[in-house]
Amino acid sequence: MYLLLNLVVFTLVGLVPAVVLCLLAGRWDLWNAWVTAGIFLAWLTFQNLATYRKSPDLLKERLTPGPGGRVRWTTARAFLVLTLLQWSIAGLDQRFHWSNSVPPAGVVAGIVLFTIGWGLATWAALVNPFFSPEVRLQAERGQRVIHTGPYAIVRHPGYASILLAVLASGLALNSLLALLPAVIYAVVTVRVTAIEDRMLHEELAGYAAYAAKVRSRLIPGLW
């Protein structure tokens, strides 16, 4: 049941912004918007199917997280709101031509970076059986430190890779103004990462030693 619900939710998250963009643009032939939405749906469908085989209880956690959340404005909630805003701005930009001046090579580069971002996010999600949208310690699920895969490079690869995808969306959708919601999302991501990192330092056994070894939170060698 939770697999089906997750697939339905992510299908809506992928398609609704694309439909809104085209409605606001007044046209349905914006290939880059549909390709971008299709890439999102492909990665998230694969991620959910693979998670169902590897950690089926995680699908329940993603839809109905347990108690103890530390942040009201999580990156997941921010993603839903800001993605719809971003794609709405891009749609209006195609209609009124405010900043839809990204060259074709830039659009393709944005789509490539978007693909890489969600690919890395899928990698992080499959390596980490505690990959929840909620900032909380999952004691009832036996949460432990994950230090393999992308977690050997940065401590929060899921946040980092989704941020890359959101930033790339403005280019992929041919709208410089659509980068503004991405900047807001970046601020939310940095704040949530700091809060979660502090929580894990204080409450998760072995995390301090892991953090001493993997020193970067989001960007290797920078932060």
Image (spheres, rainbow, N blue to C red):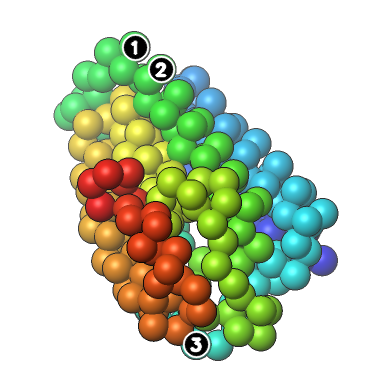
Residue 90 in view of the camera: no
Q: Are marks 1 and 2 in contact (CB under 8 Å)?
A: yes
Other-residue count near label 2 (Cα within 10 Å), few / some / many at <14 / 14–19 / ≥20:
some
Rendered location of residue 150, percent (x, y): 51, 46
Labels 3 and 1: the sequence-earlier one: 3
Compared to residue 64, the image places residue 97 above or below, namely above
If you read the primary sequence from the N terminus, does the residue marked by circle 2 or circle 3 appear first? 3
Alpha carbon distance from label 2 to label 3: 41 Å
Q: Position of residue 144 (x, y in %)?
A: 59, 72
x and y percentages locating residue 111 in the rendered image: 44, 25
Report whether 37 appears left or right of 110: right
Front position among marks 2 and 3: 3
As drawn, 150 above or below 142? above
The residue where tag 2 is placed is 108
Which amino acid type is marked by label 1? Answer: Pro
Up the image or down, 216 lies above or below 96; here it is: below
Where residue 104 is drawn, which disc sits there? 1
Secondary element type, mark 2: helix
Local secondary structure at mark 3: loop
Q: Which residue is mark 3?
A: 68
Question: Residue at 40% of width from left, 57% of height from top?
Answer: 213
Residue 126 is situated, as x and y percent measured from the top left of the image, at: 65, 51
Say what amino acid the circle numbered 3 marks: Gly
User: Secondary structure under badge 1?
Assistant: helix
Mark 3 residue crowding within 10 angstroms, few (<14) / some (14–19) / many (20+): few
Instruction: Between residue 79 and residue 122, name the one nearer to us.
Output: 122
Q: Tag 2: residue type?
A: Val
